[in-house]
Image (cartoon, rainbow, N blue to C red):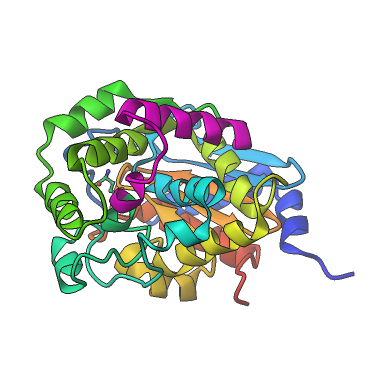
Amino acid sequence: MAITSRDRLNQLDLLQLERWAESVQGKKLSGKILERLPSDPQEATVAVASLDDHHLAWGTTGATFPLMSVVKPFLLLYLLETLGAEVVFQKVGMQPSDRPYNSVVELEIDQGWPRNPMINSGAICLASLLPGESATARCEAFRQWLNQVSGAQLVLDQQVLAQVNAHPNWQNRGITHLLNLAGHFEHPQLVLDSYNQICCLRTTVTDLAALGLVLAGKNPQIGPKHRQLVNGIMLTCGLYEDSAQMMAQIGLPMKSGVSGAMVAIIPQAGAIAVYSPLLDETGNSVWSLALLEEISQSLELSILG
Ligand SMILES: NC(=O)CC[C@H](N)C(=O)O
């Protein structure tokens, strides 16, 4: 019987994971930390989890970090499960973006239509659909649902939220204003506050891998059609303008965040979560991408091969 990706994940040992991590560290990759999210450039950690509860973790595994844009696929999943695909895709498209994740220009070119849920315009628009009367109530309901379906223990990082709110972020204000003008929602401040709060949910690589397992198929309560929609949009849009190249090079649904977090999904097999705050020009974690490419190629995890 053929060996599957799930078998290869189950057979992976910590020594091999450590070898890959150390070989990527040996490449001395360079990147920049996002000024508004101060963090330790030395922190680097990875967690691998299979659907058969085989779990490995290496590096500064105790590091905690805000999800930032890694929350976006889970926001999409929550709204698909709560409201259904018809409602969700009246608010956002499935079209890859070719400009930065927080581009106002792209939203103007598209006449206020957000291309996909993985860029800020799409996620901010979807934040308007979150059930709840206040940003705090919306984030809390979402946080509880996410912890319930994954077993993770996400918490809202009030300190990071204060840092985010202290930064004007004119790009996101411009995006929110254009979406409001286009008639997608009323109460733009409530929508932006809701988006900012869910981006500040704090986690560890072990819990992020648990979140990833939900998209890999761990939880029978989550519909396969909704998992397919989220994984498909991650595959084509999850790394912004670098998504097509990384789809060809790595071949897995992935989502990055400017905290340096990254999650990769191996459908029906498992998930890999990585954290290193050094970012490339696109806003993707340099070390995380290199390590995911190493693991995916060595274990032949690509869903495209
Ligand atoms: N790419 C990201 O992680 C961006 C998330 C961040 N909350 C922002 O809107 O700028």
Where on the picture, by quarter, is residue 162? top left
Question: Relative to 288, is 196 above or below?
Answer: above
Q: Is residue 224 left or right of residue 119?
A: right
Query: Percent x, y for residue 266?
Result: 62, 58
Q: Name the foreground residue: 61 vs 71.
A: 71
Question: Relative to 88, is 64 above or below?
Answer: above
Q: Is residue 292 left or right of residue 219?
A: left
Query: Percent x, y for residue 137?
Result: 38, 26
Q: Name the foreground residue: 195 vs 292.
A: 195
Query: Percent x, y for residue 284?
Result: 33, 55
Q: Residue at x 59, y 57 (%)?
A: 227
Q: Residue at x 43, y 55 (%)?
A: 255
Q: Name the foreground residue: 205 vs 85.
A: 85
On whether residue 257 falls in the magenta region, the answer is: no
**In the image, farthest residue toward the right:** 1
Q: Magenta residues? A: 124-150
